[in-house]
Image (cartoon, rainbow, N blue to C red):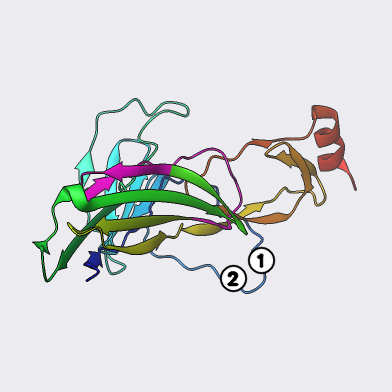
Amino acid sequence: MKPRIGLLGCTLLVLTSGVARAAILPPGFSESVVAGDIARPTAMDFAPDGRLFVCQQDGQLRVIKNDVLPATPFLSVAVDPGGERGLLGVAFDPSFAGSANDPEDGDLPPSAFSWTIVFHHADHTHPFLGPIANTTNGTFTIPTSGETSANVFYRVHLTVTDSAGAQSSASVDILPNVVTLVLATEALGVQVTLDGQPVATPHFVQSVVGMRRALAPPPRSVWAKSITAS
């Protein structure tokens, strides 16, 4: 008889960089204040229980729960907040765990478990990790560079094998948090580069939270012409 598998859900939460609020929003979006009194926020991440952790550049880690921001920081870290330094990121490690049993063997041992993690992008896949054997749980690190498309996710596969060689498999998907990046300039139509590709402002693009993107301004002569144009 095939083993029965219990596979815990996984949540992906990764770093995000602070982005200045833009004046232009894409259609269907609205702006609302969740919490004030946050000085120089640099990054944020959602905990599995729904709390929102927000980094301040001065080293304070603030927590918002049920739209309430306590006056006392969750944590304070001694940092150098000058320039682009300071407390710049927070993340919760993605984790996975499973259990399996069958009528003949009862609860199956770690040696019966085999894990693989596959990266899905659009309509194709890439091997990411595995096979990982002899464990019922683990963690892995999500890269913050590489594929910049928002149409991505990770799939954790578990296969267990009992003493008679019968196998069962299960999987769970780790979906990213996605935001809309807004590139805006005072003058319309200014050409900047995003990940090496030219785009004209205002420009809206979906991006996975925490993925590093390369943004560059136009050449100085073009910028000067754009901001002085009548």
- Give the number of the disc on residue 29: 2
Look at the image and say whether residue 130 sits in the magenta stretch.
yes
Is residue 142 in sight in this rendering? no
Q: Residue at x 87, y 37 (%)?
A: 225
Q: Residue at x 80, y 28 (%)?
A: 220
> Whole-percent x and y of residue 40?
42, 43
Q: Amino acid at mark 2?
A: Phe
Q: Amino acid at mark 1?
A: Pro
Q: Residue at x 49, y 50 (%)?
A: 119
Is residue 170 in sight in this rendering? yes
> Whole-percent x and y of residue 136?
20, 51
Instruction: Give the side of residue 122 with respect to residue 56, left or right.
Output: right
Q: Residues within 10 Å of mark 1 (few under 14, many from 20)?
A: few
- Give the number of the disc on residue 26: 1
The span shown in magenta is 129-153
> Whole-percent x and y of residue 36?
37, 58
Instruction: Give the side of residue 181 with respect to residue 33, left or right.
Output: right
